[in-house]
Image (cartoon, rainbow, N blue to C red):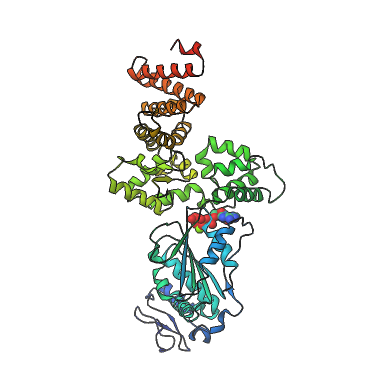
Amino acid sequence: MIGEPDAPHGQPTASDGLHGSDGAIVAGRDVNNSSTHYVQAQQAFVLPAEAYAPIPDDAAGRGISNIEQSGLFVGRSEELSALDAAFADPGEVVVHAVHGLGGVGKSALAARWATGRSEAVRWWVTADTEAAVDAGIAALARALQPGLTGLPAELQAERALRWLADHRSRWLLVLDNVEDRADIRPLLDRVSGGRVLVTTRLASGWHRHATTIRLGVLDPADAVRLFTRVLTLHGSRNTDGVHMVCAELGHLALAVEQAAAYCAETGTSPNAYLDMLDRWPAEMFDAAAQGGDSTRTIARIWRLTLDRLTDTPLAGDLLRLLAWYAPDRIPRDLLNGVAAPPRLAAAIGQLAAYNMVTDNHDGTLSVHRLVQALARTPDPHDSHRRADDISRARDHAAGLLAAAYPDDSHNPANWPRYQALLPHTDALTTHHTPDHDTVHTAAALTQAAAYRQEQGALSPALHAHQRALTTCERVLGADHPDTLASRSNLAAAYMSVGDLGRAIPL
Ligand SMILES: Nc1ncnc2c1ncn2[C@@H]1O[C@H](COP(=O)(O)OP(=O)(O)OP(=O)(O)O)[C@@H](O)[C@H]1O
Ligand SMILES: [Mg+2]
């Protein structure tokens, strides 16, 4: 909004624009009578002549970009090719959104891809708020035409938008970290004929606006490469255990990079790091190396995402519940009964929308193992990770598992169900010590053991029966019918491995 020239050096009022002696308008509707605004306005008073003309056609002559390439990029060749293919369409404005869990590497991928492009303008816009989008576009205007610097940002952005509209196919915008589609809507409504790559943690709601590409974790070998490169950046180091650390971190780029930087800086070996992760998970999830971005630790990303889900409290409950199972192929019907179906569907939908959970659309859900590990780790500073909520979720998870097992392990028709529940029973029982087992844990263990016996896996079955009996004795007492049944199961398991000496006393 640019007004007409007026009397030079006029005192600004709330309704006036400010006018330079050469007739330039230098401030718009935000001006009020405060002296601060007036001084600021005066400082921006005189604009060079080029500020009045549209941004010239050749403004991007030798190419303009604010995108920095990371020196340590690994892997992602398939994803880079997929992006090339996705943007090969010469049509109108082409918008693609790369979505995925926080820290998975969306921005790194976008930066890598964008630096290899040939558009005259390749511009990175932080897009987590509408104001940030406006600021990013205004910065583009200044890069195209430095003389616009004194103009209000709103007018700068307007100029840039006009240039983009007039120079189809000459530009590429990366809108990084979109949290709300509404924030980029006004921009997308104004431009045409260019290329827009969005990165976002939001999985859903894009179908009308963009084609989506879901970004998964790093290939294990690439994760190891990234860890090793960061670890050995300043000299050779002991790399034993790097594979294990990367696997423990679920090959999540942010976690891998931060763990490696931590090890490099503190002289911690990968194996020692693994041990620390096991013993002090809360601290390690929140640890960033000096000079690293401490606001970008896994724990903080997780907390911010859950903060956005506070209007769906069930989402947090579900996440804490799912945290006790194995990360992949969690039967969705385990959750039946946790809430009425519409509420349940909405909460799972919300978690999937924020990429905290993946709906595999085959009746199973997956949760990244690091998200699970966080959800199981109490932290007094995080309202989503209160110790009592976490233990309640653990007991609830055991109850759901116990209820989900079929009754008859001899019937082959039930075996697929046993097979599907087995990894989740194993995960649940390895994620906590036996003294936290409930009768439901014991029931799930007993069912899993019965199936294992049926399949000839006698030794793990025996251990499960032992643990189940210990729990029954502790919780129900020595003479409870369920304890007696558990004792007899254990005796049978001893017999099956030929250990009559132990079977008979039971
Ligand atoms: N392919 C890669 N090679 C090397 N480093 C990577 C790679 N992918 C990600 N990283 C590093 O991992 C960290 C997290 O990646 P990035 O910031 O791209 O994640 P993101 O998915 O954009 O996260 P957020 O949702 O928080 O924005 C960054 O420091 C980045 O440099
Ligand atoms: Mg990002």
**Which residue sits at x=52%, y=58%?**
106
Question: Of 27 and 320, which appears nearest the observer?
Answer: 320
Furthest toward the front, the residue is 412
Q: Is residue 326 above or below residue 96?
A: above
In the picture, the quarter occupied by the N terminus is bottom left
Question: Of 493 and 234, which appears nearest the observer?
Answer: 493
Q: Is residue 197 above or below residue 413?
A: below
In the image, taking residue 495 as reference, residue 333 lies left or right, namely: left
Relative image position of residue 25 (x, y in whole percent): 44, 84
Residue 33 occupies quadrant: bottom left
**Which residue sits at x=65%, y=40%?**
269
Q: Is residue 7 above or below residue 188?
A: below
Relative image position of residue 70 (x, y in whole percent): 61, 60
Q: How many marks?
A: 0
Residue 498 visible? The answer is yes
Relative image position of residue 391 (x, y in whole percent): 39, 34
Residue 28 occupies quadrant: bottom left
Residue 309 visible? The answer is no
In the image, taking residue 225 as reference, residue 327 lies left or right, namely: left
**Which residue sits at x=59%, y=80%?**
61
In the picture, the quarter occupied by the C terminus is top left
Relative image position of residue 174 (x, y in whole percent): 51, 67
Residue 478 occupies quadrant: top left
